[in-house]
Amino acid sequence: MAYHLHPEGPSHVVTPHLHLGAGAQVSRAELGAAHLQTGPIPPTAVIRLAIEAFSAQPSRQQWDVTLREADSALLES
């Protein structure tokens, strides 16, 4: 999975989107090249996904508190 946002550059897609590469083991070739619209995805959501769904090891014991505080700070800005 690769989350992309490149509002400037050679691509015609300038909105937030997701790519599913070969590692996602999708069975349709079209999905590998597709730009799946996502809307904005905060970095904290990607970190939480890695920890909760893919068993990434957090570097802090209180990682959940840290991510919630970061999310709150993003909402306030």
Image (cartoon, helix red, strand yellow):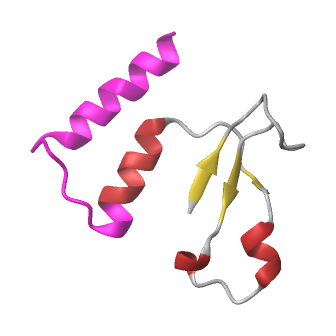
Residue 58 colored in magenta in the image: yes
Residue 66 colored in magenta in the image: yes
User: Going by the picture, which residue comes out furthest to the top?
Assistant: 77
Q: Residue at x 14, y 40 (%)?
A: 62
Q: Residue 55's x, y, as percent?
A: 27, 67
Q: How many marks?
A: 0
Residue 14 left/right relative to 2: right
Span shown in magenta: 52-77
Q: Residue 19's x, y, as percent?
A: 67, 61
Q: Quadrant of the N terminus?
A: bottom right
User: Going by the picture, which residue comes out furthest to the bottom?
Assistant: 27
Q: Residue 8's x, y, as percent?
A: 78, 28
Residue 72 left/right relative to 60: right
Q: Residue 41's x, y, as percent?
A: 58, 40
Q: Quadrant of residue 72?
A: top left
User: Going by the picture, which residue comes out furthest to the front?
Assistant: 10
Q: Quadrant of residue 14?
A: top right
Q: Residue at x 38, y 66 (%)?
A: 53
From what the image shows, is residue 5 above or below residue 21? Answer: above
Q: Residue at x 20, y 41 (%)?
A: 63
Magenta residues, dominant SS class: helix
User: Going by the picture, which residue comes out furthest to the left?
Assistant: 61
Q: Residue at x 84, y 43 (%)?
A: 11
